[in-house]
Structures are given as C-alpha cells and as structure tokens.
Image (cartoon, helix red, strand yellow):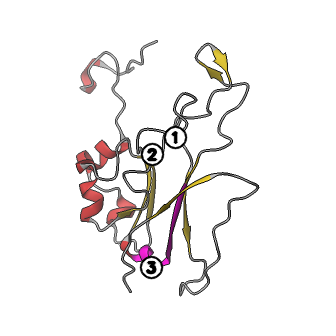
Amino acid sequence: MEDRRACLPSCGHRAGPVEPAHPASLLVEKGLPAPLSSGEKDVVVLGDFGQGPDSSDHDLLRKERFHPLVPAHTFTNISTKNPQGSKSLDNIWISKSLRKVFTGHCAVLREGLTNPWIPDNWSWGGVASEHCPVLAEFFAEKDGTKREGPRSGSGVALERSEANIKHER
C-alpha cells in the first residue's frame, strides 16, 4: 500500500509516493535543530543516522564539534541471516563538553533480540528490529573521578568498541 499525501492541490506537495526524509538528510537541508544550535553545552544526539559516522552527511555535526562514539567499522544492524551485521547505521554523537565524562566504552547489544512470535520471512523467530541497541558509558560523578567497570546485566553479550577520543580538559 502506497503512502500518499492528503493535501490540497495548492499546498505545493507533489502527489504520489512520499519519500521518507532521513534524519541525516534533514540536518544537511535544514541545519541543526534549535536545542543544538542554541549553545547548549552538554548534548547527546542518538539514533538511526542511516549511514556510517564517516559519511559527509554528518559534516554539520562535525563542524559543531560533535563526536561519534560508535566507530564506522562497528556494525549496528542485525538479521537472522546475518547476526553480526553489515552496516553502521546507528550512533551516539556527543558534544565536545561531554568527551571528558565519556569512559571510552560503547557497545552494540546483539543477544536476545529475537522472539518466537516475530515473523522471519516464511518462518518464525525473527528480530524485533534491524537496528541493534547501542549504548555508551559515562562517568557518573561530575568531576569524572568515579569509574566503575561496565555492566553487562544478566549474561547479555555485548560487542565492545573502544573509542579513540582525546580527553580534552
């Protein structure tokens, strides 16, 4: 079933299928949203960016001194046919001020993402989403002195990634 705009002819929208705008393309077209461009100091931008962090689509974030925590070589998608993934779609970008409280540990959760009630083509046991959950660890204390080891919960397998960040103070 096609998605069609329900607008008056005078609105200027074209009739026909609607191409979904990807968040990264919106950043390029419209610039940073107000909370990011207002001078807010501690900002985290996360989600599905549709492309790896090295893409030129993210130049605006880099220009504003944001840093991606998940490296381009770490895949964040999943399927039952390819459980290790093949694309780096999701990420967590942090503002310069948050680099000093980032522990250097981020992970992609890959276990426990299927369910016997989710279809997988013509069978069952599919994944809940093609996107894996991505997490990052930050120091809890404001001065960054408290450092606890990463927790993986109750036997949850994590794919670890050590980010190469210069801690600027």
Which residue is nearer to you in this view: 63 or 115? 115
Horizontal side of 141 relative to 27 (left or right) equals right
- Residue, disc 1: 84
Local SS, label 3: helix
Characterize the local packing of mark 2: few (<14), some (14-19) or many (20 or more) Cα atoms within 10 angstroms.
many
Q: CA distance from mark 2 to mark 1?
A: 7 Å
Which residue is nearer to you in this view: 9 or 92? 92
Residue 167 at x, y percent in the picture: 39, 80
Q: Residue 100 has which mark?
A: 3
Instruction: Decide whether residue 110 is among the magenta residues.
Output: no
Instruction: Decide whether residue 102 is among the magenta residues.
Output: yes
Q: Is residue 40 above or below residue 69?
A: below
Q: In the rendered image, which quarter is residue 139 located in?
A: bottom right
Q: Are the residues at dot 2 and dot 1 in contact (C-beta closer than 8 Å)? A: yes
- Residue, disc 2: 75
Local SS, label 2: loop
Q: Nearer the viewer, mark 2 or mark 1?
A: 1
Q: Nearer the viewer, mark 3 or mark 2?
A: 2
Q: Is residue 65 above or below residue 152?
A: below
Query: Given the image, on which type of amino acid does mark 3 rest?
Result: Lys
Q: Which residues are magenta?
A: 97-107
Q: Residue at x 65, y 77 (%)?
A: 148
Q: Quadrant of the C terminus?
A: bottom left
